[in-house]
């Protein structure tokens, strides 16, 4: 049978990654500007063609025998082995559609085996082993790809990002205030001033998500720059926004406006006037829906955001992602429609966000309709606290400035009730919990729900867990809770936290202690709340514990590259109940893989900083190839 898949679906030119000066990490976060609109259009056209082609392919392959016919490999801890292979084909064994050979393939199987070839059929892996042994699976229609010694890993699985919101950041109407375009307050003021000069009075001035400086202008400082334009600026974390007087007035916010549930409208202590600072989503959402590019967007534009995000994920080396804040059932519908149109080649696992008890009840009624093949709705997201920049991290010690504005977003009883309701219905629940007190509140709610309605392996998850007590880690282990976190924070925000939190840094994201406790770790990049998409930043943060100035933060909490890669592949797959189909290169699993420019297991740090995917493969199909890669596409 001729493999109907096209040999090469996309051949996007990537933007040049600015190579970092050796020994200088002050610029380690520099990354290319967003891809151009024309490039996005080219890509999207590619996605449509690819999806149609893939559909046809799947149709023809539907009647295949189950690909997982080969027995399990014995563990191999000896590394590359010429002779090692899954058993060769006997009479009647199916031939491969595609064989990747001559590589250094880190399988992330239980023994961390390294092989040099992998055979794929019908989008799944059917064998791994030596190039010579897998030769036997080659038939006349089998394509092959010579990896020329390059390193391959499983496709990275991102356990925590915001795909829809990330894709939204690249709209031309926004000022680009993301790091590294804007690093300081001065940069931010300059960008606003420039935009005012070219914008009609009365029109909105809005930044994308968002700025990282810790001293943004307030309402009145913005008024000086933009007296005649409404201004909306969101912090990168998404935990707070700042707006000017004109924006407050359009939203009808005055000193008499009450705080929305779980949120705070910043007010001047002496006059009671709104300061322009809006803390937590319900307060931000008093203004955000009015802003073009945020609230004022069409359904087609929103689908475009998701597709832009998906394209960037392939370019970064992710083959599966978990969008952990789907704001509304309408947003779930966007994913469903894209998948049904064949326009969502990226595997997306979704958690639907709930704002309050009433919101939880209303959304739960809709939940049965939210299942599908290339998207998986499986659970719920709740926030217990906020972020360091907003001062809304819920710590036991509220004297530290990361906790200066903190309060629990829900009363413990309310949290217990919501979690119990979801748990009882068989769902997974994930909590935004950054501070040690927030982590304990989430654990209390989980324990309450699990005690009331015991069921095996619910895999509830805590997102972030930047600060936690040793007792909390023991409870996390005991309750089988997953810690899904973003080690990029160590590099990007470690120094800021240190400055804002004098006493807690020895317990800043204690990854080694978590692994030693036997806790299931999952890694994600958390864009757009963090600046950088690529999984290498998690690997660098977790293995070096360096800030961008190469200062160690909790150096004794370093974990190894093997542990970090495993957390970011198998660990993240486990967090989404997908460990049997993704996360490692083993027979029977989906053929999701990345060919890297460097061997991430052995590359020194300066090479790791420039490492990037050369080819990304999803279910046996090339979905991304770097324009400067010398690799030939399967033929
Ligand atoms: Zn997030």
Image: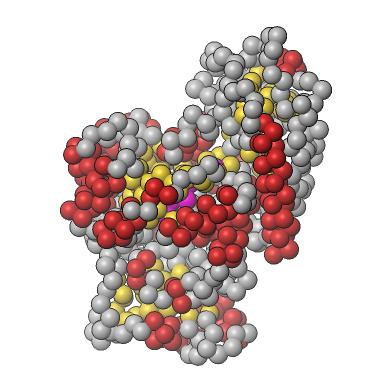
Picture mark count:
0
Front residue (pair 598, 196): 196
- The residue depicted at 56 percent of the width and 28 percent of the height is 589
- The residue depicted at 25 percent of the width and 51 percent of the height is 418
The x and y percentages for residue 444 are 21, 45
Q: Is residue 323 magenta?
A: yes
Front residue (pair 54, 206): 54
Quarter in which the C terminus is drawn: top right
The magenta stretch spans which residues?
A: 320-325
- The residue depicted at 55 percent of the width and 90 percent of the height is 201
- The residue depicted at 46 percent of the width and 38 percent of the height is 572
The x and y percentages for residue 180 are 57, 62
Front residue (pair 362, 240): 362
The x and y percentages for residue 609 are 61, 46
Q: Is residue 168 above or below residue 103?
A: below
Front residue (pair 153, 553): 153
Res 402 seen here: no
Quarter in which the N terminus is drawn: top right
Q: Main secondary structure of the magenta part?
A: strand
Colour convention: secondary structure
Task: Please state if 414 lies on the left or on the right of 587 as rendered.
Answer: left
Q: Is residue 150 above or below residue 369?
A: above
Q: Is residue 556 magenta?
A: no
The x and y percentages for residue 374 are 54, 44
Task: Please state if 239 lies on the left or on the right of 563 as rendered.
Answer: left
């Amino acid at each position: 049978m001729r493999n109907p898949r096209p040999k090469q679906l996309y051949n996007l030119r990537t933007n040049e990654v600015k190579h970092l000066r050796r020994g200088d990490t002050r610029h380690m976060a520099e990354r290319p500007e967003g891809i151009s609109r024309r490039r996005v259009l080219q890509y999207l056209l590619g996605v449509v063609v690819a999806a149609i082609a893939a559909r046809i392919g799947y149709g023809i392959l539907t009647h295949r025998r189950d690909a997982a016919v080969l027995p399990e490999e014995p563990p191999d801890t000896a590394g590359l082995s010429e002779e090692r292979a899954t058993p060769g084909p006997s009479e009647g064994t199916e031939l491969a559609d595609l064989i990747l050979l001559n590589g250094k393939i880190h399988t992330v199987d239980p023994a961390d085996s390294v092989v040099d070839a992998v055979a794929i059929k019908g989008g799944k892996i059917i064998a791994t082993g030596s190039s010579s042994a897998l030769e036997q699976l080659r038939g006349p229609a089998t394509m092959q790809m010579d990896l020329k010694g390059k390193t391959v890993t499983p496709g990275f699985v991102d356990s925590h990002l915001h795909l829809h919101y990330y894709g939204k950041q690249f709209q031309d109407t926004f000022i680009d205030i993301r790091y590294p375009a804007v690093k300081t307050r001065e940069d931010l003021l300059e960008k606003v001033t420039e935009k005012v000069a070219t914008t009609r009075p009365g029109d909105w001035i809005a930044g994308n998500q968002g700025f990282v400086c810790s001293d943004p202008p307030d309402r009145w400082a913005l008024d000086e720059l933009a007296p005649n334009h409404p201004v909306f600026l969101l912090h990168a974390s998404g935990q707070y926004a700042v707006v000017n007087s004109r924006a407050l007035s359009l939203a009808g916010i005055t000193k008499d406006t009450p705080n929305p549930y779980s949120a705070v409208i910043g007010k001047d202590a002496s006059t009671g006037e709104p300061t322009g600072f809006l803390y937590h989503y319900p307060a931000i959402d008093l203004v955000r829906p009015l802003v073009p590019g945020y609230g004022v967007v069409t359904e087609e534009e929103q689908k475009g955001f998701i597709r832009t995000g998906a394209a960037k994920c392939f370019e970064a080396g992710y083959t599966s992602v978990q969008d952990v804040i789907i704001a509304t059932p309408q947003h779930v519908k966007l994913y469903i429609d894209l998948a049904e149109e064949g326009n969502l080649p990226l595997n997306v696992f979704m958690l639907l966000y709930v704002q309050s008890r009433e919101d939880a009840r209303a959304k739960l009624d809709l939940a049965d309709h939210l299942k599908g093949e290339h998207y998986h709705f499986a659970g719920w997201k709740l926030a217990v606290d906020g972020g360091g920049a907003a001062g809304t991290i819920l710590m036991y010690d509220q004297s530290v400035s990361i906790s200066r504005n903190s309060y629990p977003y829900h009363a413990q009883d309310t949290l217990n009730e919501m979690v119990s309701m979801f748990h009882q219905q068989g769902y997974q629940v994930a909590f935004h919990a950054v501070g040690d007190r927030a982590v304990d509140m989430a654990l209390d709610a989980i324990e309450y729900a699990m005690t009331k309605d015991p069921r095996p392996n619910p895999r509830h998850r805590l997102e972030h867990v930047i600060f936690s007590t040793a007792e909390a880690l023991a409870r996390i282990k005991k309750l089988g809770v997953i810690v899904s976190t973003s080690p990029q924070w160590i590099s990007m925000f470690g120094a800021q936290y240190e400055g804002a939190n004098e006493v807690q840094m020895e317990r800043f994201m204690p990854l080694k202690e978590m692994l030693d406790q036997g806790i299931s770790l999952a890694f994600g990049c958390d864009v757009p709340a963090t600046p950088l998409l690529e999984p290498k930043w998690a690997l660098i943060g977790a293995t070096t514990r360096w800030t961008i100035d190469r200062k160690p933060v909790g150096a004794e909490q370093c974990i190894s590259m093997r542990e970090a890669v495993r957390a970011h592949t198998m660990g993240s797959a486990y967090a989404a109940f997908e460990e049997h189909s993704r996360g490692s290169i083993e027979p029977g699993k989906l053929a999701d893989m990345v060919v890297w420019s460097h061997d991430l297991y052995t590359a020194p740090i300066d090479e790791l900083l420039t490492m990037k995917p050369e080819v990304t493969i999803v279910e046996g199909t090339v979905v991304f190839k770097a324009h400067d890669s010398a690799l030939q596409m399967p033929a």
